[in-house]
Image: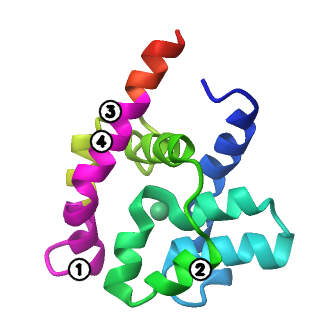
Amino acid sequence: MLGDDADLLEAAAWLHDIGYSPDLVKTGFHPLDGARYLRDVHGADPRLCCLVGQHSCAILEAEERGLADELAREFPPGDPTLIDALAYCDMTTTPTGHLVSVYDRLAEIAQRYGQGNVVTRFISKAGPQLISSVHRTEHRLCLAQ
Ligand SMILES: [Fe+2]
């Protein structure tokens, strides 16, 4: 479905949460920490860094954390098809790597972080966009078959 960008998506899918690694936490906001690490330590492809930085509506959580300007300036969103596809990968996979519906995934995240947590606030705001990303990707997958 993605042609020459398939490898880029696969790399982003593997690396998108690298910012959770305790060794590279700087701001505590994992999309930004991960993207900066890939850019500054590994000189990674800028498109990969932007996908990691913007993964799964990260800009909405960045707004909650007062980091939206930094994120948008350093890692602007790229190709919407790739952004959708990465959200699809993230939102249809459990933390242990099992296939899950986007609805169950969103519910699991909210339950894991609990009421009042910044991630729970973010996920309730981002939910409709993430669901749309998954549906658009499923549609593209159908068309590509
Ligand atoms: Fe993430």
Image quarter for residue 124?
bottom left
- Mark 4 is surrounded, within 10 Å at the Cα level, by few (under 14), some (14 to 19) or many (20 or more) other residues, namely some
Residue 79 position, x and y percent, is: 58, 48
Instruction: Residue under label 4, please give it.
Output: 132
Neighbor class of circle 2 (other Cα within 10 Å; few <14, some 14-19, many 20+) is few
* Mark earlier in primary sequence (4, 1): 1
Residue 20 showing in the rendered view: no
Foreground disc of the pair 3, 2: 2
* Secondary structure category for the residue under label 3: helix
Measured in 3D between alpha carbons, the distance from the residue under mark 4 to the one under mark 2, in whole angstroms, is 25 Å
| Whole-number angstrom distance, CA of label 1 to CA of label 2 | 26 Å
Specify whether tag 2 is near ligand 1 (CB below 8 Å): no
Residue range in magenta is 110-137
Q: Position of residue 95 (x, y in %)?
A: 43, 51
Query: Tags 1 and 2 in contact by the CB under 8 Å rule?
Result: no
Quadrant, the N terminus: top right
Q: Amino acid at mark 2?
A: Arg
Q: Is mark 4 within 8 Å of ligand 1?
A: no
Badge nearest the viewer, 4 or 1? 4
Which residue carries the number 2 mark?
73
Give the residue type that dot 3 points to. Answer: His
Check disc 1: other Cα within 10 Å, few if <14, some if 14-19, many if 20+.
Answer: few
Residue 126's image quarter? bottom left
Residue on which the image places disc 1: 117
Q: Is residue 4 above or below residue 108?
A: above
Q: 139 left or right of 81?
A: left
Which one is earlier in the sequence, the residue at label 4 or at label 2? 2
Q: Residues within 10 Å of mark 3 (few under 14, many from 20)?
A: some
Q: Residue at x 22, y 42 (%)?
A: 103
Q: CA distance from mark 3 to mark 2?
A: 28 Å
Q: Are marks 3 and 4 in contact (CB under 8 Å)?
A: yes
Which mark is drawn over residue 135? Answer: 3
